[in-house]
Amino acid sequence: MSKVGEKTTAMPAPEIMPGGGIDPDLVKQDFPVLRQSINGHPLIYLDNAATTQKPVAVIKRLQTYYESDNANVHRGLHTLAERATDAFEATRDKIRSFINAGKREEIIYTRGATEAINLVAYTYGRQNVGPGDRIVITRMEHHANLIPWLELARQNKAELVYIPINSEGYLDLSEIDTIINNRTKIVALTHMSNVLGTINDVEEITALAHKKKAVCLIDGAQAVPHMPVDVQSLGADFYVFSAHKMLGPTGLGVLYGREELLQAMPPFNFGGEMISEVRFDKVTWNVLPWKFEAGTPAIAEAVAFAPALDYLENLGMENIRRHEIELTAYALSRLSELKHLTIYGPQNPEHRGGAIAFSDDKIHPHDMATFLDTQGIAVRAGHHCAQPLTRLLGVNSTTRASFYIYNNTNDIDTLHEALLAARRYFGHG
Ligand code: PLP
């Protein structure tokens, strides 16, 4: 077990090919769930924007934790409690270094990206946003980064203003100087869109927000798993993501917040762990990060998130990004051969991630996803928790294929063939 603060030295992973490319076939061998057939076909998992699969190392750590270390954290004076606490806190250090936060106190465990955004909206938001103030978000947000702000604006009588997007799927920043005005208290935007795939120029927006003395929250749920992220160089005040979208267990997320902001914020939940001293008539709060971690946290999940981070670090986030650019470029080119498809988001693979939403001009996305499942291909269909954006695209739902480290070009070829087979099956061949 690694000690608190210890950094593991990354051995070159065998999955890295000479020149830095990832070998997805070798990676795949580490993921037991991918070794099965679905409806008589080898499983091709293309629903990674929803959640990723877990490597053996993560599954094993969950098992060894429960078999040999299980205890509640922070309160026990026995060996198991110490082991559980050390492992739980060691992951916090790994997360700090993974996103280059300045201090471990700035890493708050949450249940997911959604809870992390709600935490900021309920605490920082309620404290700092008043009548007539402005909250700025974009038209490409997941509901997780839209509804908390809509609610905060409604409750505190503030304005919610949206940065528009252009027809190519990029943010339209032509009016940004008037959108982020002197009344703006919070700017919140996604680092990478889960529908369009667009990677936003976060550094530019944080700088603009800071010029107007607003804080900036970045929703990194789709970015941290897929590219190197440095919260300090991005200028993020808050940055959120979920473990399950980056090989880790479900039920665990991260809020990064700048220490001075977190210090000044009131707690989110109240109860055990988040206190320093409690009397019948008053209470003082625990220090960071535990002030925001009331109750028993997701201990096993945090412990087993460490091997997920190690796995990604061993592959190298730059290599992962490069692999996904290549796959995305290939997918965009193969899918655009099918003239009956509309493909959403930027066409330049350097400007986007590997979540590709598309629609067939004759087949409903739900029918398409169901048909693809009969071919062993898992994709998502629906509004992808971004209803306003989906409507803006002129549809009610889309089909989305999203890639990760274990996907290869054969998967995309098989998807291409299955999309053609769907046309024949539904009588449009
Ligand atoms: N933000 C984005 C961009 C997402 O894609 C998602 C999940 O799909 C979320 C936030 C919410 O993540 P979670 O459901 O893990 O809290």
Image (cartoon, rainbow, N blue to C red):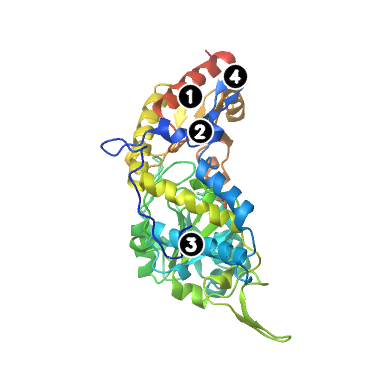
Q: Is residue 35 above or below residue 167?
A: above
**CA distance for labels 4 and 2:** 17 Å
Q: Position of residue 194 (x, y in %)?
A: 49, 44
The residue labelled by disc 1 is 415
* Residue carrying label 2: 46
Which sits earlier in the primary sequence, circle 3 or circle 4? 4
Q: Earlier in the sequence, mark 1 or mark 3?
A: 3
What's the residue type where badge 3 is placed?
Answer: Ala
**Which of the pair 154/13 is nearer the observer?**
13
Q: Are marks 1 and 2 in contact (CB under 8 Å)?
A: yes
Amino acid type, mark 4: Gly
Q: Is residue 98 visible?
A: yes
Name the residue: 54% across, 61% down. Answer: 88
Q: Earlier in the sequence, mark 4 or mark 2?
A: 4
> Which corner quadrant of the image does residue 281 belong to?
bottom right
Q: Look at the numbered disc 4 and give the secondary structure of its residue.
A: loop
